[in-house]
Image (cartoon, grey):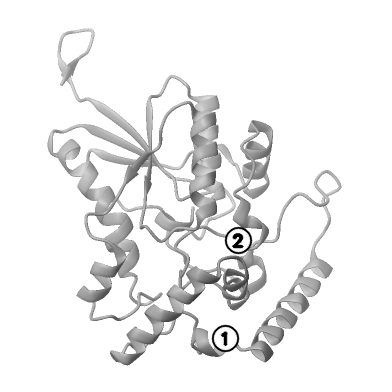
Amino acid sequence: MTKNQNGVGAPQEKHVLGLSGGRDSAALAVYMRQHYPEINIEYFFTDTGKELPEVYEFLGRLEGFLGKPILRLNPDRDFDFWLRQYKNYLPSAQSRWCTRQLKLRPFEQWLKPMLAQDVMVVSYVAIRSDEDYREGYISNKDNLIIRLPFREAGIDKAGVMEILEASGVGMPKYYSWRSRSGCTFCFFQQKIEWVRLMEHHPSDFEEAKGYEKTALMHGSPFTWSQGESLEELSLPDRITQIKEDHAKRLIRLKGKQIINPLRPDSEPVDIDDLYGQAKVCLACHK
């Protein structure tokens, strides 16, 4: 406990901000550093061990701007351990055990001793003002407060882009071929993103294919990509079909968009704009 001016015990405070390796959480870290430098925020990243190499490079760049290290919360059990615990059944949108065990569990274990000591923990989450359909982590502790600074300040996707560009941090390099962070084999990827993973990181694609084969042998009802295995998806004719479908979607979307004369080319097309809003795990993708 600390003491206020009257000498009365006041609860200690801890300010934390989780980074996914993605655009929005990085922009929030920059925003808080620029607008609230008096707040001592501890930045953390929960490493599943299955992240894109571009994510680690981006986190290093972000550490340089923040001027302080980003704490790595490594789960005490890795993906392979939990895969065995779940009888080799792959995680899916219906059973998101990967987020629960590899992201949320380490975060909650890290906070547990602080909360037990009545430390007031304020967690900042990067949900934008144009994401009314998203909700943050639901706290069931009176001394764990969730704040949404972007929503409070009215900052949308364009605002996030401006924050990263103006700071010099820029965008994660994987945005040239993939529109969100997360594990290399995240089941929320669209088929075009699986194709691009195969092209940019073939060893990671082969690892995902191996996990899938083992899961199917053990009776798992899920494949990584809905409706087809990665073996089927990686056939040459199927790759051509996926790329052609993606190109058609881009043409249709761009035909409907109203060009902003102030930002004619700088705002990228998100995968959700093309394929519909996905209820992705915020701990992984924000």
Q: Is residue 182 visible?
A: yes
Instruction: Find residue 89 and report its image quarter.
Output: bottom left
Q: Amino acid at mark 1?
A: Leu
Q: Secondary structure at mark 2?
A: loop
Check if mark 2's residue and mark 1's residue have beta carbons within 8 Å. no
Which quadrant: the N terminus? top left
Q: Is residue 135 visible?
A: no
Q: 282 or 56: which is nearer to us? A: 56
Q: CA distance from mark 2 to mark 1?
A: 19 Å
Picture coordinates of residue 8 (x, y %)?
15, 14
In this image, 162 relative to 14: left or right? right
Q: Give the number of the mark in front: 2 or 1.
A: 1
In this image, 68 relative to 4: left or right? right
Picture coordinates of residue 96 (x, y %)?
34, 70
Q: Secondary structure at mark 1?
A: helix
Q: Amino acid at mark 2?
A: Ser
Which tag, 2 or 1, sits closer to the chain's start? 2
Which residue is under mark 1? 233
Q: Residue 180, relative to residue 190: is it above or below?
A: above
In this image, 156 relative to 112: left or right? right
- The residue most toward the right is 261
Which residue is under mark 2? 179
User: In percent of the image, x 45 and y 80: which residue is there?
Assistant: 209
User: In percent of the image, x 71 and y 56: which residue is there?
Assistant: 268
Instruction: Find residue 88 and report its image quarter.
Output: bottom left
Badge 1: few (under 14), some or many (20 or more) residues near its Cα, within 10 Å? Answer: some
Q: Residue 62, relative to residue 93: is it above or below?
A: above
Picture coordinates of residue 153 (x, y %)?
56, 37
User: In percent of the image, x 22 and y 25: which residue is there?
Assistant: 12
